[in-house]
Image (tube, helix red, strand yellow):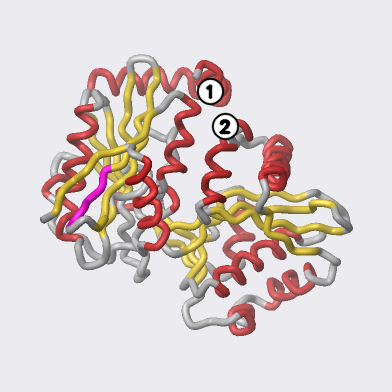
Amino acid sequence: MMELVITKEQLWLDKWDAYVLHENRASHLALSDWNKSFTSYGFEFEICLCIENDKIIGGFSAVIAKATIFRFYIVPFGPILSTGLECNLNVLIAQVQENAKKANCCYAHISLPFSASVNPHAYPILPELPALDKATKGHLFKYVYSTYGMNWIDLNGFDEESKIMTLKPSVRRNIRNSYRKDLVFKTMTSEEEIEKAYNLFKENSITAHYSIREWKEMQETLLKLNEKGSLKMLAAYRENELKGAILLLKGGNYYTYILGGSKKEAPDLRTGDFLQWEAIKLSLQEGLDGYNISLGGSKGVVEFKNSFNTEQIYYDNGQYHWVLKPFYFNLYLFIEKQLKPYKKTISKMLSKFK
């Protein structure tokens, strides 16, 4: 008999994270430690588990975002169910609404990995979902990142040599040139190494005028993910000096590229090509069927990612929201519009208040 368990008990969180790591329809965005990271802003989180015969068969991880009188129930990825058990999906979606109401939220949204693209990590078809009858497509709350797709590099049936030959000659040349520049590959595992790499990401974000969270806000999360085997910090060194690094998180039986940074030098060491190819090699070595190099970024970043012969898989038909308290949510939208230019400052204030 199937039952739903809403919990923050560590024993169940660990079981859920193990499920997310190896369940094809999951993602790192459903990991409890990832959603727990938002507590640095004073937010809350909870896990809803779908259990049958004492075994997890699905569920969702939710962030309860809070700002003064406003509360928002955000499911960054999912709900999800193991392959073949999608008939229970409606029950989980209905539970999202129920939990949001109990938490006194004015808004809730979900992010179903549903796509017409044929991919084992997405639902190709969904059952009848009456729980969505009063939902609206899309997301209106943007302050907790929620999935909208994958930038997929297919590795099924490939080895290193056959995979590199699928790339354009210019891309193959860039990868091979990067290995001629005396770069030394290293997987960073200690707290000191992971912090050093994250500080490089922070330096790059300041130079390029985009925002990432401070190390002290992410420290506990990243170290826990590293301890559980969900995190890989890949680095390129030259003459014992860190030249570049990328952060990968594993969930759903694949790695996702999260952050990266490099030292800007002339001539270019091509650390980006070097490290992304190492991420592909890692995925091949672990027998994974693909690598998510992730969507988004500046024009140059998008072009670089797509040069790896990617397939963009969008979940446009899987994003839904409910406005549970129209007066409060419309008031939030009005205030948010006025304060949007100060988003970075507000994030810092929330963290300090916490």
Please rate how many residues cluster around mark 1, counting C-alpha atoms within 10 Å: few if below 14, some from 14 to 19, many from 20: some
Which residue is rendered at x = 79% and y = 49% of the image? Answer: 263
Does residue 139 appear in the picture of this structure? no
Which residue is rendered at x = 53% and y = 23% of the image? Answer: 351
Between 59 and 302, the one nearer to me in the picture:
59
Q: Residue furthest front?
A: 11
Dot 1 falls on a residue whose secondary structure is helix
Reading the image, the residue beneath label 2 is: 217
Between 72 and 253, the one nearer to me in the picture:
253
The answer to which of marks 1 and 2 sits earlier in the sequence is 2
The reply, left or right, for residue 161 in relation to residue 342 is: right
Q: Is residue 102 magenta?
A: no
Which residue is rendered at x = 44% and y = 24% of the image? Answer: 42
The tag on residue 239 is: none
Expressed as whole percent of the image width and height from the top left, the position of residue 212 reads: 60, 36
Expressed as whole percent of the image width and height from the top left, the position of residue 354 reads: 50, 19
Image quadrant holding the N terminus, namely: bottom left
Label 1 close to label 2 by CB (< 8 Å): yes
Kind of residue at disc 1: Ser
Majority SS type along the magenta span: strand
Kind of residue at disc 2: Glu
Above or below, comparing residue 303 to residue 111 in the picture: below
Reading the image, the residue beneath label 1 is: 351
Between 79 and 192, the one nearer to me in the picture:
192
Dot 2 falls on a residue whose secondary structure is helix
Which residue is rendered at x = 45% and y = 52% of the image? Answer: 28
Expressed as whole percent of the image width and height from the top left, the position of residue 284 reads: 55, 74
Above or below, comparing residue 113 to residue 167 in the picture: above
Q: Which residues are magenta?
A: 48-52
